[in-house]
């Protein structure tokens, strides 16, 4: 396995996307980590922080088909999957594909759609296929969904239940730029024009290589045990009703492997686990009260700080 392919791929993607999203290299790398792991992203942030532009630039950079779906209360599952319609000219039913047949999907304000429509998206995320009128059709690869939620508006929304939130690989937050970064953005050319000027910087073969080989990154037993100590810590903490699921443990393992590969190593360090754990685990814990995203991240960080780091890293 050639580890330089991972670092080169990461550098090209981050360099290209950072032309659009200034000062958010870490967030770009985390989205890329989800993509390589075939996971999906839940992005919770206030409006106007660049969520849409981030995914548009990412899709353009990797050369994949992009679709944006604005979720509303009247959105139907067929608006996502597609429908069979009757063609009067041919006298036959034909299938008209919905936006889920793209590679990169932006689900804007997913919590504004009804649970039925949310479920149709989440089924596609989990199974990588859709069912229409009894027929099942596979979705094209690669396939990634980034769903957004506005944390400051709850009127007219249908919050995602915990079982559905758990299907997202990571929960991220972009946040505001620094003063200097924002000054450079407001005085530059149109962001849309910058995205249009972006070129595809990686090939499908490069993407396929990373997706097929990241599982070859070695994880020492002591580091795997360290991950499980963190997972079990969420299950034993009396502050939580339920801790992190097995799906969450698998996600942490994969994310740590890709993080190590992007750092140019073929083995995982505890620092890799620490880096991604808050993003992979925080949205998977359930407390008795309504925890904010920041509070749940702090809970995970406190659990991590209380667990001894293994001395043997290789």
Image: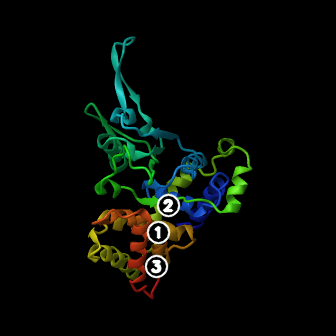
Pick the residue in front: 312 or 29. 29
Label 1 close to label 2 by CB (< 8 Å): yes
What secondary structure is found at the residue carrying circle 2? helix
The vertical placement of 221 against 122, above or below, is below
* Residue denoted by label 2: 33
* Picture coordinates of residue 302, whole percent (x, y): 41, 78
For the residues labelled 1 and 2, the Cα–Cα distance comes to 10 Å
Residue shown at 51% from the left, 73% from the top? 266
Residue 216 visible here? no
Please say which color scheme the image uses.
rainbow
- In this view, the mark in front (3 or 1): 1
* Picture coordinates of residue 239, whole percent (x, y): 29, 73
Q: Quadrant of residue 196 in the image?
A: top right
* Residue denoted by label 3: 270
What secondary structure is found at the residue carrying circle 1? helix
Pick the residue in front: 297 or 205. 297
Q: Is residue 293 left or right of residue 49?
A: left
Residue shown at 43% from the left, 42% from the top? 140
Residue shown at 50% from the left, 59% from the top? 173
Residue shown at 54% from the left, 44% from the top? 64
What secondary structure is found at the residue carrying circle 3? helix
* Residue denoted by label 1: 276
Q: Quadrant of residue 134 in the image?
A: top left
How packed is label 3: few (under 14 Cα within 10 Å), some, or many (20 or more)?
A: many
> Along the polypeptide, which appears first: circle 3 or circle 2?
2
């Amino acid at each position: 396995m050639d580890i330089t392919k991972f670092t080169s791929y990461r550098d090209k993607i981050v360099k290209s996307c950072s032309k659009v999203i200034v000062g958010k290299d870490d967030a770009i790398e985390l989205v890329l980590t989800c993509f390589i792991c075939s996971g999906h992203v839940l992005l919770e942030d206030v409006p106007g922080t660049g969520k849409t532009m981030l995914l548009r630039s990412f899709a353009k950079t990797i050369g994949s088909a992009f679709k944006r779906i604005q979720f509303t209360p009247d959105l139907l599952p067929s608006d996502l999957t597609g429908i069979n319609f009757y063609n009067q000219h041919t006298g036959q039913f034909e299938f008209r594909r919905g936006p889920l047949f793209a590679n990169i999907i932006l689900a804007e304000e997913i919590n504004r759609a009804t649970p039925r429509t949310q479920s149709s998206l989440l089924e596609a995320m989990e199974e990588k296929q859709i069912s229409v009128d009894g027929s099942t059709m596979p979705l094209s690869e690669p396939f990634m969904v980034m769903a957004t939620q506005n944390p400051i508006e709850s009127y007219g929304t249908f919050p995602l239940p915990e079982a559905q939130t758990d299907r997202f690989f990571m929960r991220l937050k972009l946040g505001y730029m620094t003063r200097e970064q924002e000054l450079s953005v407001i005085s530059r050319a149109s962001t849309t024009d910058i995205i249009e000027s972006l070129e595809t910087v990686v090939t499908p073969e490069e993407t396929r290589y990373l997706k097929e080989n990241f599982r070859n990154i070695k994880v020492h037993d002591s580091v795997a045990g360290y991950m499980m100590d963190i997972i079990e810590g969420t299950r034993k903490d009396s502050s939580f009703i339920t801790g992190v699921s097995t799906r969450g443990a698998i996600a942490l393992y994969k994310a740590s492997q890709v993080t190590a590969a992007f750092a140019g190593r073929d083995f995982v360090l505890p620092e890799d686990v620490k880096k991604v754990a808050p993003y992979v685990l925080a949205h998977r814990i359930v407390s008795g009260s309504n925890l904010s995203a920041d509070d749940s991240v702090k809970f995970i960080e406190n659990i991590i700080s209380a667990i001894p780091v293994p001395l043997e890293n290789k």
